[in-house]
Amino acid sequence: MTRRFFACLSLLVALLAGAVMPAAAAGPEGRWAGAIQIPGTELSVQIDLAPVEGGGWKGDIDIPLQNARDLPLTDFAVDGTSVTFKIGGIPGDPTFHGTLAADGSKLAGDFTQNGQTFPFQLERPSTTGPTDEELKAHLAEYVPKILETWKVPGLALAVVRDGKVVLVEGYGVRDREKNLPVTAETLFAIGSSSKAFTTAALGMLVDEGKIEWDKPVRTWLPDFKLHDPFATERMTPRDLSSHRSGLPRHDLMWYGTSATRAELFSRLGDLEPSADFRTKWQYQNLMFLTAGYLVEKVAGKTWEDFIRERLFTPLGMTASNLSIAEMEKVENRSLGYQEKDEEEGGALEVMPYRPIDAIGPAGSINSNVVDMAKWVQFQLGDGTWEGKTLLNRATLDELHRPVIVLDGGGIVSLLADEELPWVMYALGWFVQPYRGHLVVHHGGNIDGFSAFVTMLPKENAGLVILTNKNGTVAPLVLAAHIHDRLLGLPEKDWSGLMKAKRDEAQKAAKEAEKAQDEGRKAGTKPGHALPDYAGLYAHPSYGDLTVEVLGKGLGLTYNALQKSPMEHWHYDVWNLTEGEGKGTKVNFETNLQGEVERLSVSLEPSVDPIVFTRKPVELTAEQLRRFAGQYELPGVVAVVELQGGNRLTVTVPGQPTYDLLAYRANELRLKGLPGFSLRFEEKDGKIVAASFVQPNGTFRAPRK
């Protein structure tokens, strides 16, 4: 093998693709797969050949190892069983000289380039799968069994085969109480399957020369800032889209928040990373928020408007929308459901819709299988739709090209199998081998809904599975079953395998909870009265958190955690007993004066607990005016004055005048003097004294 041979092949660009063709062709027409036997390796190829009306032939070739796709074939010579053709536009005159087997099943011969010759052999791919009608009949019986086994109320399914939609169907109910059926037009939330729309939007801006995959994000968003300075400077759109920022999920920062997209973007800088930049795959919704924010700033319109105008409208996705507010206007929409814990009976209950507009680019799209089938057809195509180019072919291929390999974690344990040996991530898509076939896919889960979009690019096939149950793996089970059918593979008990994985995960979670209980220190009491813990606490990235007295205990409010009850655990540690945060521990910390000043809570388990600091109260001018007056210290009189209506100061003879900053309702701190404050004493609605709190003691001064 010469360097020149490799140099010629290195000119070939793109990814795998194509459609399964009939195996019974009499001549060379159809799809072929095989390899050129280069010393020391096999160069796999896939070839499509077709006769041209009026005489002649046409075709193209894919060479996956060289990232080559749809290279044109030229100079055909077909004479009986003798078949010759060349790869057009490549130096070295690369030519196939082959002989067709008598039964038309094989094409073998010599490949020559630059005067060197290597043997090749091609075969027609097996097409042992069921017919479309057989598949429909089978699924009519099989899908209801999946719904029953996995306690899923309703499901919608689309099947794309040979690039055509062969099935769109609804199963089960979208509303259990009213017994309303799921149809192909029923809207579901697709969750993180939305991410591929955001990367497609980025791809469009790449095609227009407005951004580049590998230039720093700060080129277009100069305010972009992360905790890691190197990641801040070097983060690119490719990094944003492939979960390699170094940040773990930090999802509770945005889940249930009232903050806007711009506000969340501005608060990224104090989120602690758990890995070095580009060293580890960690699922990260906030980076997809940033990708959508980048689309907005570069395109000059909201992410929502961009998706509607540039994707939904040209693709004819007329039923799809981008928010809960829009979804609630549609009659044929599904409710979302969740399964209660086993100790609560395991029954299904409605899970309220949750607006997630701020994080929209990571997962806010609602759609049905009719629309999503068009999305799959577009992704399986060449970037055009009805004669109009939406994405350059090379850019579409880029979206599906792996960027990073997943190494461990819950997603790998769920998706990996002995016949699915590893999982990779591209740009808004997972990529992995599936029993010897390439699969590109992405799931989605958001309050009450689980979705799965998956494609077999080489077979030009794909699926959309939308369900109305929170956190179910039923879409993965069904997808694997249909993949096996389409590919004519021996069936595996995917449902049993997934159930075993789920049961193992649930068992591990219960054991972890039990181990946590064993660490509790018995016989301790809180270090403070309940009102001392109450207040507003803040973190620069996570925002505000409120603690209040709730019955005989405390309650915590933070984004989706609304008035979550807390019981005393031990010492100054409290435990959330209900809701989304059940089992989460909150540790209160004091300052040198023994006052509750901070709390730490593990909102992101892969980093240190998030520390929230007590936030100063806001006092009106009228409230500040109550403190103004003269206070008698031994030998001197301290004067507290209201300056200009909203500035309170204190002056002690012989010392500078200090501004007083609101801290608590009856306590203000001296600006620039850490550890110094004035604590005002109230009796019968009047301020009667002020205590000067200092590191060396507390000095009471009666009001004069």
Image: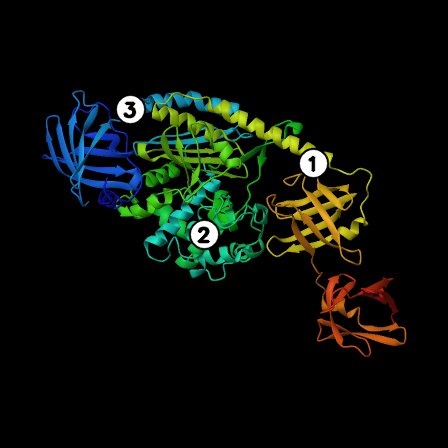
Q: Position of residue 217 (x, y in %)?
A: 44, 57
Instruction: Work out which quarter of the rendered image holds the C terminus and state it.
Output: bottom right
Q: Amino acid at mark 1?
A: Gln
Q: Which residue carries the number 2 mark? A: 291
Q: Which residue carries the number 3 mark? A: 126
Q: Residue at x 18, y 45 (%)?
A: 91
Report if the CB atoms under discs 1 and 3 are less than 8 Å apart.
no
SS at mark 3 in the image: loop
Say whether residue 181 is visible.
no
First of labels 2, 3 by sequence position: 3
Instruction: Work out which quarter of the rendered image holds the N terminus and state it.
Output: top left
- Badge 3, how many Cα within 10 Å: few under 14, some, many 20+? few
Say whether residue 596 is visible.
yes
Work out whether 82 lies above or below 608.
Answer: above
Quarter holding residue 435: top left
Q: Which residue carries the number 1 mark? A: 516
Q: Position of residue 314 (x, y in %)?
A: 33, 46
Work out whether 564 lies above or below 260.
Answer: above
